[in-house]
Image: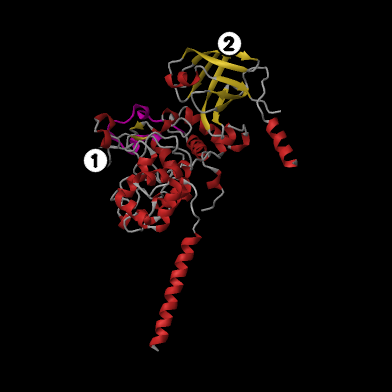
Amino acid sequence: MKKTLIGLLTGLSFSFTLISGPITGRWKVYDPRGPQFQINFRTDNSFTAYSNEGKVLITGNYRTDKDTFLVNDLNCNAAYWGKYQLNIITEDSVAFKLISDTCSGRSEAVNGIVIARLKQK
Amino acid sequence: MRKISFLVLVMAAILVASFSFTRRSEQEIPQTPAALGKMLFFDPILSRHRSISCSSCHREKYAFADTSATSIGELNKKGSRNAPSVMNVSGSGSFFWDGRASSLEEQALIPIANPAEMDLPVDSAVRRLNDDVQYLRYFMAIFKEKPNAKNLGTAIAIFEKTLNTYNTPFEDWQVNDNDSAVSASAKRGFQLFNGKARCAGCHFGGDFNNGGTDYRNIGLFDGKQLQDSGRAVITRSPDDVGRFKIPNLRNVAITAPYMHNGIFRHLREVIEYYNDPDKIVPHPINRDPLLSSPLHLSEIEKEDLENFLRALTDKRFVTTPE
């Protein structure tokens, strides 16, 4: 019983909650077309996308300007910035809509995805 | 006297039989396709003279790669290419240095039949498994059918798909934001990898191999001393001459020797090559433009790059002393 309670509390403390704030921090990506993964947007404008198991998938850099999100990563051309519009769905869930990105692999992966902020209580 | 000799003989036979029975019954009975695949991977039953197994060239201790420049097959036959690691292959879209197999299931059967490797036609391998009471039972229990080429390839492929490693200092640094997980040198090495050293021009993605479906000519084909034309063996396209599959870099520090022909014995030699390929292969044919000019890396930068590559080693290998 005690173990169950501890497990439940641990589970709750790592559950996803929607909070407000800038894009920096950890996010869970919801993409019905592919496997789920997470992203860590750091304050130094670098980011790491990683699988739910903890394997690094992509690293790169990002910038935001109001509701515009710019991204570059090594899977595409590191000198080229893809551009997406951030659509706020709720306080802390955001959808990405393609503005311009010549990197087809990235635009197919990013356009339409929804991310929800992951908060560790 | 004759009676005593007979008794001794009978007792010896009983002892041998019981020993053999114990050995077999002690083996863990596989309950899943992956466990069966693991058993097959390590079993020499799949080689003509039962002398080698998949694990002879894909050695667990070395991230399931080989330490020989080119692998040694049955009867000490020398292969022509270096055995790559079979870890972290579940996301790969093609297999072998020249991409001759498009699935892991297909890949798994090819070395069994290759005369320079295990040298056992797949039909013969399947027959052996059907003749082996234990394997027959295992296949029936797991696949609900007798051993055949398809479920043999499937079992080995499923086992190989379990060999994923991402418990590395690099992951600890990047995923957990643990700044002390890697050295300052390795962090600089990561910057070099992505920038000045141009490694990420080919080695990107989760396994640093562009999904395992891309082929590049890094200059190790000159038509004279270096005659393996790589991908062109399969496609017959002149554009593919000298191209080889971009290898996975996870655990690269323990998978020496390097390149399709195992030409470099140390990671540092690989870095030296990329730093100035012309010094080592002066007249390559069809080399990728990415390698058209020297990198001009300093000695410290070379060390940084090497330290970053070492940070891709799974902790299971770091903690296991040689």
Res B224 label: 1
Res A67 label: 2
Left or right position of B220 against A105: left
Query: Disc 2 vs disc 1: which is toward the camera?
Result: 2
Q: In the structure shown, which secondary structural element does the residue marked by tag 1 occupy?
A: loop
User: Distance of mark 2 from mark 1, alpha carbons?
Assistant: 58 Å
Chain letter of disc 1 in the image: B
Q: In the structure shown, which secondary structural element does the residue marked by tag 2 occupy?
A: loop
Residue B75 colored in magenta in the image: no
Is the magenta region chiefly helix, strand or loop?
Answer: loop
Along the line of sight, the residue nearer the viewer: B132 or B291: B132
Q: Is residue B63 visible?
A: no
Res B32 label: none
Left or right position of B189 against B156: right
For residue B208, which quarter of the picture? top left
**Magenta span:** B274-297
Q: Position of residue B311 (x, y in %)?
A: 53, 39
The vertical placement of A41 against B146, above or below, is above
Residue B282 colored in magenta in the image: yes
Q: Position of residue A29 (x, y in %)?
A: 56, 24
Q: Position of residue B138 (x, y in %)?
A: 44, 52
CA neighbours of label 1 inside 10 A, class few (<14), some (14 to 19), many (20+) = few
Along the line of sight, the residue nearer the viewer: B121 or B242: B121
CA neighbours of label 2 inside 10 A, class few (<14), some (14 to 19), many (20+) = few
Q: Residue furthest right?
A: A2
For residue A25, which quarter of the picture? top right
The vertical placement of A6 against B125, above or below, is above
Q: Amino acid at mark 2?
A: Asp
Left or right position of B180 against B222: right
Left or right position of B256 against B278: right
